[in-house]
Image (cartoon, helix red, strand yellow):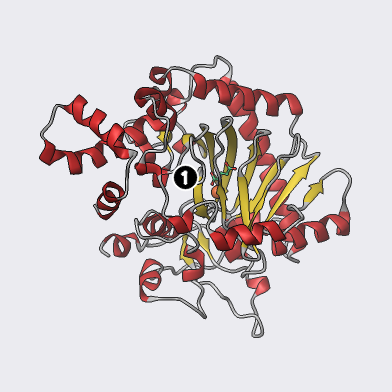
Amino acid sequence: MAAMTMSRANDRFSSDISSRFHELKGGGVKEELTTTFAELTRFHDVKGVREMMKSFRVREVPSYYVKPASERRYAPAAEAAVNSVAQGIPCIDLEALSGEGLLRAIASACRDWGFFQVVNHGVSRPLVERMGNESSEFFAQPLEEKLKCSTPAKVAGPVHFGGGGNRDWRDVLKLNCAPASIVAKEYWPQSPAGFRNTLEEYVAKQQALAVRLLKLISESLGLETNFLVEACGDPKVVVAINHYPPCPDPSLTMGIKAHSDPNTITMLMQDEVGGLQVFKDDGWIDVRPLPNAFVVNVGDQLQILSNGKYSSCLHRVVNNNRQARTSIATFFSPSHECTIAPAPGLVDELNPAIYPKFIYADYIKAFYAQTLAPNNSNKSSFLAGIELHRNYNSYTKKCFSKVSSSPGSCTTSESSVSSIRSN
Ligand SMILES: O=C(O)CCC(=O)C(=O)O
Ligand SMILES: [Fe+2]
């Protein structure tokens, strides 16, 4: 409600869109305040930005999508810092490097950046191109075709098409891809015709790449090769295909607001348009698209398992007013039953555990409860709030209260989700 009041007070753009909703509903003026916001939310969640622009012939950004000044692309402090950083994120060639040299490159990328690109990664170019082309074709289809890809559970379901969260200027098709028990292939796009097969093939390759990277990352930390893979149990793999329509005024919106990924590791394929930025040294740095590369980033669980040695960095996507952008993120996560804690091999008297032990399902519940809260600020990180020796507050203590199994193991322990819900 607060957001609605704010947007109506300072908005000259919302009136066109809200009066259209008003007209369509044929409702009374009194109802308009609440219904308009609810209608916009429903419209965005179900149909997305691309459809909103088409249906309402939008030429300016509706206030619904306008970010507070501190979260916009050109917030003054961030812009100054972007200009002062010349270099890009590291790029690691998985064929040219090997042995200690490769481990050193991975260690410094994960420690100093939390982000890197990989080339010669073993996923064939034709497959990557097919995945990219068919994904773009999916979003270009009529709405009715895209709406077939949402289960009744919508965002919480195993397949979902709609507008991205947080009123970001983004549409998304999210698909659970593993384990088999959470996959609903009958909702995967039937059009373009080859999509289902392409996705299956792509996910198998992405999963193999994630395992390969996690083995290298384990070794780069001085851990057993399989430590991180085993810490994730029977992993959950989700693919999110993001589509960012061109935006009439990208200085007011965000494609994805600043966040860190809650999972273990993310691999991202992006087209040539660009827009992804990483927060480093107080400024936003562009992740420039490289041909046939994947962007890899350390997720929150990897930061925790590495006891803070590796960084899960804030990143965001800025919009442009020229052309649509498509990116495909593969999120590799622990299974929800996994117990996560800093690796015992990285904890001793001099290096105490800086994170608590918890069940991954609890982390996810609490993460989304906090990051989707309307007053969540641009640069807050859920992860920072659970550090044991700094900000471990009563809220997060409650979230992780009842874990009894050993670190890195995947047992079903009593969950503390109920304590989160009751807050
Ligand atoms: O589209 C991108 O470049 C990044 C997407 C992202 O950060 C995410 O889906 O979590
Ligand atoms: Fe992300």
Count of numbered marks: 1
Q: Could you tell me residue 133's position as x and y percent?
A: 63, 23
Q: Is residue 113 above or below residue 161?
A: below
Is residue 161 visible to the viewer in this orientation of the structure?
A: no
Q: Quadrant of residue 309?
A: bottom right
Is residue 200 visible to the viewer in this orientation of the structure?
A: yes
- Say which residue appears at 47% left-offset and 64% top-offset: 380
Quarter of the C terminus within the rendering = bottom left
Picture quadrant of ligand 1: top right
Q: Is residue 176 above or below residue 364?
A: above
Q: Could you tell me residue 369's position as x and y percent?
A: 36, 57
- Say which residue appears at 56% left-offset and 75% top-offset: 354
Q: Which residue, given by chain and number where applicable, does mark 1 sit on?
A: 253
Front-most of 241 and 8?
A: 8
- Say which residue appears at 25% left-offset and 28% top-offset: 20
Front-most of 148 and 255?
A: 255
Relative horizontal placement of residue 93, taking residue 133 as reference (left or right):
right
Relative horizontal placement of residue 420, taking residue 405 as reference (left or right):
left
Relative horizontal placement of residue 73, taking residue 9 as reference (left or right):
right
The amino acid type, in three-letter code, at marker 1 is Thr
Q: Could you tell me residue 321's position as x and y percent?
A: 55, 34
Q: Could you tell me residue 280's position as x and y percent?
A: 65, 61
Q: Secondary structure at mark 1?
A: loop
Front-most of 126 and 61?
A: 61
Residue pushed farthest front? 12
User: Dot 1, how many residues are within 10 Å of its Cα: few (below 14), some (14-19), or many (20+)?
Assistant: many
